[in-house]
Image (cartoon, rainbow, N blue to C red):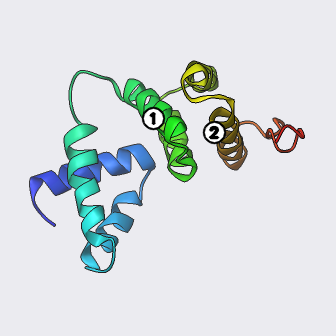
Amino acid sequence: MSDDRTARGLRILDELMGDGASTRMQEAIASNGFGSAIGELATHYAFADVWSRPGLERRQRSLVVIGVLIAQRQLLELKNHIRIGLRNGLTLGEIEEALIQTTPYVGFPAVASATTAIVEVLRELGIDTSTRTPEERGML
């Protein structure tokens, strides 16, 4: 795992997800266990190749990914990318606008589920501990 592409991908992974993310990824890849090849693909393709491209700032890339994950209802990955988006400088207002922008295209149920995931991350990070999820408000 010493080639330039791997090193670039691991560096970007740490920049996006914080110190230690690359170590966990390296361990997963080196294990040669189930999923190790997927970790290597993610390191090379998603991080080294896509996240490092010119043309969009990381904040913009984060908004795109957040919108796609809301549409796909991939809530665990959405939580990761809310954390990444915040590290990339997204504001709470921008994240809320992403929710609003996706609503006409993916519908209220998908946005309600995404809202719950986002509120959980905001609580975890201590950013907003007072907002209630749609479930807590009795809306779902």
Q: Nearer the viewer, residue 2 or 43?
A: 43
Mark 1: which amino acid?
A: Val
How many numbered callouts?
Answer: 2
Image location (x, y in percent) of residue 8: 20, 49
Disc 2/disc 1 C-alpha distance (Å):
11 Å
Image location (x, y in percent) of residue 93: 63, 20
Image location (x, y in percent) of residue 39: 30, 63
The residue carrying mark 2 is: 114
Q: Nearer the viewer, residue 103 or 116?
A: 103
Residue found at the far right of this picture: 138
Classify residue 28 as left or right of residue 72.
Answer: left
Mark 2: which amino acid?
A: Ala
Q: Quadrant of residue 105?
A: top right
Local SS, label 1: helix
Question: Quick check: 3 above or below 119?
Answer: below
The residue carrying mark 1 is: 68
Residue at coordinates 44% horizontally, 49% vertically from top-left? 17
Question: Quick check: 92 above or below 33?
Answer: above
Q: Quadrant of residue 41?
A: bottom left
Callout 1: few (<14), some (14-19), or many (20+) C-alpha neighbours within 10 Å?
some
